[in-house]
Image (cartoon, rainbow, N blue to C red):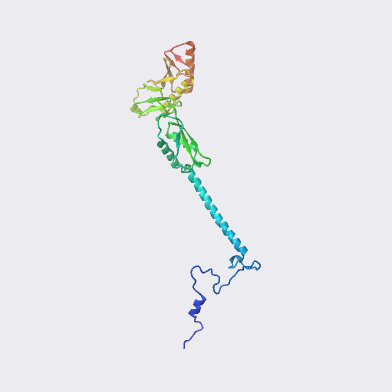
Amino acid sequence: MKLKFPWAKNKKEANRRKPRLMQGQDSYIFRRSRTITGTKSAKVTASAPARGQFKTDRLQLMELREHRRRILRFLGGVLVAVCILAFLVVNFIVTPPITFVQQGVRNPATKSYEETIYRYFDDHPLERFGFMLRQYELEAYILKNHSEIVGVGMAREWYGGGVQFAVSFRQPLLTWKTGVSQFYVDSQGVAFTYNHFAEPALKVTDQSGIPPDQQSGIVASTRFIRFLGQIVGAVNSYGLGEVESVIIPAATRQIDVKLKGRGYLIKTNTDRDPLQEGEDVAHALQYFDRKNIQPQYVDVRVAHKAFYK
């Protein structure tokens, strides 16, 4: 006879009371020893209806609407993210499109200008997006690295993308050749090495006696070249004769200018203001034309005075 102790548990009863459930069956509402809560009736009030297993049609509809709102909010967020990403993609400048305003006789090195813009983008990565690009800062950077450019225009679409760069070159007024290099100078006195247009007729004759190898390939200081371009532009602006040649004598701070149709030299001083000196030259030439005088030379190196012989 088998003895049974009251505190001993029957293994079969323990297995019946705690059945093993498969994964996903924890929410099964008809499990043994579980109280079913909630109601399907709209007239019967139940405690905590949102947590019950039975729910009214109205409560199910409310939960369905809330679930739909969550889905719509998620889809709206995805749509906004896609629109922002698309906006950034169409504004991103992969290769800067460069066009040249003037028609020249040479083909400019487009790749060199593109590399300059790339270097600017390396220092300002956010400006690679068209809507954030600052035209004046980019133009100043390009002019600093390419003296032959006088301006860089920029056009873009209403949304900021489709950026186009329009490059304008300097018009050379004269050329200055040495044994190792050649410079071009415009009317504002800016020197550059690349000429996009035809060769200018005006050339500088250097009689200073300084060999190019002692100048390390630099023909003159920036201030001197600026004065040279400005004095030629100032004299030509009065319409009394176009500068035909420029001679740099051995004397310091002096430039001799010769005009077409006039057989004498005009001595100028590089320490003076070129615009005022050009005005003195114009007054002297007008006086010679009125008096029908043909001097050997004209000296305007002193302000507001002209000496001639």
Where residue 261 sits in the image (x, y, percent)?
43, 15
Farthest residue toward the right?
Answer: 43
Where residue 78 sits in the image (x, y, percent)?
52, 52
Farthest residue toward the bottom?
Answer: 1
Is 232 placed above or below 41 here? above
Q: Where on the picture, by quarter, is residue 32?
A: bottom right
In front of the other: 228 or 238 = 238
Does residue 278 appear anywhere in the picture?
Answer: yes
Where residue 151 sits in the image (x, y, percent)?
47, 32
In front of the other: 162 or 183 = 162
In front of the other: 65 or 194 = 65
Is 62 placed above or below 142 here? below
The mark tally for this picture is 0
Q: Residue at x 48, y 13 (%)?
A: 289
Does residue 273 appear anywhere in the picture?
Answer: no
Is 163 placed above or below 30 here? above
Q: Where on the picture, by quarter, is residue 266?
A: top left
Q: Tell me the quadrant of the picture where the C terminus can be found.
A: top left
Left or right: 216, with 89 as reference point = left
